[in-house]
Image (cartoon, grey):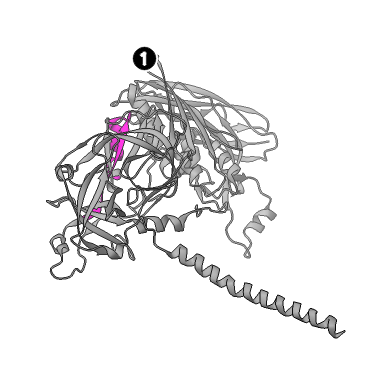
């Protein structure tokens, strides 16, 4: 027995020693991995080692596609700018090209090297400085913010937002431009006595403007948005970049978007082109870092990233800038944050295709095809600009006109959103463009995660005259009726020229209506929408939202609606007429509050009339007595 026990004890003791050894080695391995991860990248120059008087080299494209070298003399480091726990390096550009152009729009992202190591991206300027002074975003700040943000696309979990019927039907659309993620300010940092930075105290430091090149966009459309674009750090430039064709993703090689090359962020491509231009700071395998400051501060984004060609740099006392045109798409921009933009090579973004058939006042048909970026903030703006430009490209820019708009917005898994509007006024083109931007804005900002917008198709017809009328009055052939009878309503419409015509409308009284007074409404779709008890609603899902958008009344024709004076309610988007007293009492219980809108008029029937020759506006009410 003892002979058997000894080997067993020896084996058990050996196993214990082995397990202890493994356990002891595990933290050592973790520590080694952590220490390796914490080691600084040998390709990058640490911010803490930057000193005034250092000589640096930078790269950017002044013409063509090849980056050219110029010098940067380091003046110092500005802590706490542009945000807490961030810093900016201040430098002076040197070299013939840089001294001629100064710090120019499109230079954003130009990489700066000290001792052959990347220290940061040129991103800020002193607009009124007599010297070419720049601010440099440290590369570590650019990398860190994007490393933290990977895979954190904002999701709402299907939470919807309150919608307004009046806003959905409106054509007076105004976008709420975001506040710039990084704004300029006065250089007033505490600096040491004798520091070279003292000479800059009191001057303005701001992100370098990003040139936003419009091609095919009318000057009228550009002027509508120029002030807001400039307020957000963008420099609108019209007519200098060629239209960007819709091409598939290009092949990525080692020579694709090297540091210092010009990069384009395409918002629209096809018959229209709208693209922002800057410079690549760093390429790390398939990851691209650029700009050094935000483009628009969109956060998570999905926009085409393309190569670009620089025609030349226009030197200007006010603001020098690059003349550039977009080239082959090679990837997508997925992040737009405070320290720059971040993209991935070899990944195609999701764009929204648009096709417009414009039937002109001269009996010609022009077809426009293009794509717009898929973004809840940008897409409505881009649609508004391009549709307005389409109408203005061949039709009159001044004076009255009539614009008819028919089409649809395709949404995956849903019924198409139907668009059928007509406008006759001095600004019919702007109203027509807004009538597409409004439902698109409602879709993309709804809060639902499953909004997948497909192709948008539009047929636009234009005439060079105003064709509108006003509903003057209505009359009945009799005011006392019986159940199931049909009465005739005469709607008297007066045109802008003073002519009057009568539209005769048969209205059938429901067979089950109680005796008493009814109210008959005749008016245009907009007036009926405003008079409706259902003004705001919270859609339960995307299907309900699409249905509500499709139920918006049309603005160019008359509607007839018959009401009974009795208690009802509106719950969500549904009108619930003629409620029994017990239901009304339950809704008005002291134990509950909200959730419905009480109504004094309960709808009995509604009729949409075919569109007339004229766009009719106005409303009238008249009473009808049901005697038996």
Residue holding disc 1 = 362
Residue 562's spot in the image, x, y percent?
Answer: 58, 36
Seen at 15% across and 66% down, the residue is 195
> Does 502 sit above or below residue 309?
above
Question: Around disc 1, counting alpha carbons within 10 Å, would you say few (fewer than 14), some (14 to 19), or many (20 or more)?
Answer: few
Q: Quadrant of the N terminus?
A: bottom right
Which stretch appears magenta?
205-228
> Which residue is most to the bottom?
2
Quarter of image, res 205 = bottom left
Any part of residue 398 in sight: yes
Left or right placement of residue 523 versus residue 6 in this view: left
Direction front: furthest residue: 3
Residue 571 against residue 254 in the figure, above or below: below
Coordinates of residue 583 in the picture (x, y in percent)? 68, 54
Q: Quadrant of residue 617?
A: top left
Query: In the image shown, does 329 or 604 lie closer to the viewer?
Result: 329
Q: Residue 501: horizontal and vertical position, in percent? A: 44, 21
């Amino acid at each position: 027995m003892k002979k058997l026990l000894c080997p067993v004890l020896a084996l058990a003791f050996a196993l214990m020693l082995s397990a202890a050894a493994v356990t002891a080695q595990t933290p050592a391995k973790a520590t080694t991995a952590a220490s390796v991860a914490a080691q600084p990248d040998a390709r990058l120059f640490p911010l803490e080692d930057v000193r005034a008087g250092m000589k640096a080299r930078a790269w950017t494209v002044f013409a063509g596609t090849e980056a050219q070298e110029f010098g940067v003399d380091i003046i110092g480091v500005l802590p706490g700018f542009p945000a807490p726990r961030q810093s900016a390096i201040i430098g002076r550009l040197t070299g013939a090209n840089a001294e001629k152009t100064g710090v120019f729009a499109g230079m954003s992202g130009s990489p700066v090297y000290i001792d052959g190591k990347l220290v940061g991206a040129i991103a800020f300027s002193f607009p009124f400085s007599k010297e070419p002074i720049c601010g440099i975003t440290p590369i570590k700040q650019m990398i860190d913010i994007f490393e933290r943000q990977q895979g954190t696309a904002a999701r709402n979990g299907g939470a919807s937002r309150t919608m307004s019927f009046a806003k959905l039907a409106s054509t007076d659309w105004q976008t709420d431009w975001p506040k710039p993620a990084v704004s300029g300010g006065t250089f007033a940092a505490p600096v040491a006595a004798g520091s070279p930075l003292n000479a800059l105290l009191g001057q303005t430091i701001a992100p370098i403007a990003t040139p936003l090149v419009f091609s095919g966009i009318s000057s009228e459309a550009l002027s509508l948005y120029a002030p807001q674009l400039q307020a957000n750090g963008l420099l609108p430039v019209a007519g200098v970049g060629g239209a960007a064709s819709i091409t598939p993703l290009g092949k990525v090689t080692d020579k694709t978007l090297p540091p210092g090359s010009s990069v384009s962020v395409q918002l629209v491509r096809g018959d229209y082109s709208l693209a922002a231009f800057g410079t690549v700071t760093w390429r790390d395998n398939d990851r691209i870092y650029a700009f050094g400051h935000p483009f628009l501060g969109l956060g998570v984004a999905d926009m085409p990233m393309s190569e670009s060609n620089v025609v030349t740099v226009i030197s200007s006392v006010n603001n020098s800038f690059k003349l550039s045109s977009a080239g082959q798409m090679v990837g997508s921009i997925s992040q737009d944050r405070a320290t720059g933009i971040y993209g991935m090579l070899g990944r195609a973004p999701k764009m929204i295709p648009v096709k417009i058939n414009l039937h002109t006042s001269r009996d010609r048909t022009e077809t426009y095809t293009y794509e717009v970026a898929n973004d809840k903030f940008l897409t409505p703006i881009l649609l508004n600009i391009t549709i307005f430009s389409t109408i203005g490209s061949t039709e009159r820019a001044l004076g009255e006109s009539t614009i008819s708009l028919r089409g649809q917005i395709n949404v995956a898994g849903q019924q198409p959103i139907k668009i059928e509007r007509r406008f006759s006024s001095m600004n019919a083109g702007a109203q027509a463009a807004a009538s597409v931007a409004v439902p698109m804005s409602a879709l993309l900002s709804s809060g639902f995660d499953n909004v997948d917008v497909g192709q948008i198709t539009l047929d636009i017809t234009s005439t060079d005259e105003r064709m509108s009328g006003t509903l003057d009055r209505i009359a009945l052939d009799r005011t006392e009726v019986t159940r199931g009878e049909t009465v005739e309503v005469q709607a008297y419409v007066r045109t802008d020229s003073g002519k009057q015509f009568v539209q005769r409308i048969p209205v059938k009284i429901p067979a089950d209506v109680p005796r008493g007074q009814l109210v008959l409404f005749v008016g245009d779709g907009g007036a009926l929408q405003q008079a409706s008890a259902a003004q705001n609603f919270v859609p339960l899902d995307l299907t309900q939202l699409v249905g509500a958008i499709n139920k918006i009344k049309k603005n160019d024709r008359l509607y007839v609606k018959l009401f009974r004076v009795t208690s009802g309610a509106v719950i969500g988007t549904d009108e619930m007429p003629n409620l029994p007293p017990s239901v009304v009492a339950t809704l008005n219980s002291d134990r509950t509050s909200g959730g419905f809108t009480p109504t004094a008029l309960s709808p009995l029937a509604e009729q949409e009339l075919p569109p007339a020759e004229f766009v009719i506006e106005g409303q009238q009410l008249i009473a009808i007595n049901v005697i038996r």
